[in-house]
Amino acid sequence: MTTDGAEHIVGYKKLTAVWVALLLLTVATVLITRVELGAGKVWAALAIACLKSGLVIAFFMHMKYESRLFQIILAVALFTLAIFIGLTFFDVLYR
Amino acid sequence: MSHGAHKDKVAAKLGMWLFLFTELLLFGGLFILYAVYLARYPREFSGAGRQLDLVFGAVNTVVLITSSLLAAMAVTAVKRGERRLTITLLSGTLGCAAIFLVIKYLEWSAKISHGIFPGSAKLLAGAPGESVFFGLYYLTTGLHGLHVLIGAALLGWICAKVQSGAIHAGENIALENATLYWHLVDLVWIFIFPLYYLIL
């Protein structure tokens, strides 16, 4: 897929569709956090932020079209960050 | 390959991604700090967070998402050999970067004129959780703003190279890597916006 000379090109139409989705998700996150959901709105806002990030990484940053190696190192980086967050809270919450 | 270095596009992009992961962990650390202090001072964070202007934050979100779209389109344009369009799209991204920074300036000056800045008499007299919130706010948005500035400078330089013909359909990895950096700036803001402006 990433052989020399045959690089993948994402069309303008697809990029624009992603942009529209990102704007709609932004509206959704503003509206959902105006409702009093307590801790629920934190999780809802974070879930939407993760979804938006996924769209940006997959299409704007071409990750969907990169080789398996790129996808694996992305997973390793995110997994490392998740360990940092998990272990920090394991310490802070049960101190 | 007859003379000079053989350029490996995949390796260049891989190097850029590795750098982006270090950036991810840098901002990740700041988000962890935020989360820990939010758990410790929920009431103070809530009171302080509501003082942030949702409109400034929301407009800047739209501005950055749009700038990212234009940057991604610029990569498509350069690969298709559309030089003029590439330059127009990159200029659009730079315009968005400028709007973002102006809004950030307005937002920060409004806060500072209300006596809210690290070490101000008002924050020192207030609850400790509040000064922690605004300390993290200035640190995180300041570091992010610095990244916007660096990203814009990088894209401006790339734009000049497209203009001169040094970057074109067959040789565009520098443009691709610069836009990857720009998208990272957008990604960080995607998390700053809900955490600081919305959930509190």
Image (cartoon, coloured by chain):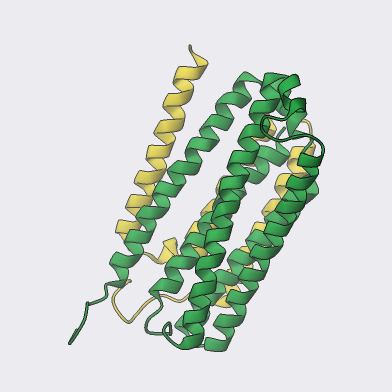
Chain colours: A yellow, B green
Q: Position of residue B60 (x, y in %)?
A: 71, 55
What residue do we see at 56% from left, 65% from top? B152
Give percent across and percent down for residue A10.
49, 74
**What residue do we see at 37% from left, 60% from top?**
B16
Q: In this view, does B23 lie to the left or right of B125?
A: left
Q: Is residue B70 above or below residue B21?
A: below
Q: Residue at x 29, y 78 (%)?
A: A4
Residue sitting at x 51%, y 80%: B160
Left/right placement of residue B14 relative to residue B199 reads: left
Q: Quadrant of the N terminus of chain A?
A: bottom left
Residue extending furthest toward the top: A95
Residue A39 sits above or below residue B151 on the image? above
Q: Can residue B13 be seen in this view?
A: yes
Looking at the picture, how far across and down is residue B178, in whole percent?
Answer: 47, 67
Which of the 4 image quarters holds residue B174? Answer: bottom left
Question: Could you tell whether B69 is left or right of A63 in the image?
Answer: right
Residue B96 spot, x, y in % from top left: 67, 66
Residue B178 in the image: above or below residue A84: below
Using the rendered view, name the quadrant where residue B193 is placed. Answer: top right
User: For this rendering, which residue is in front, B180 or A38?
Assistant: B180
A78 displayed left or right of B192: left
Vertical order, B120 against B81 (above or below) = above
- Residue A27 shows up from this direction: no
In which quarter of the view is residue A71 placed?
Answer: bottom left
Total residue callouts: 0
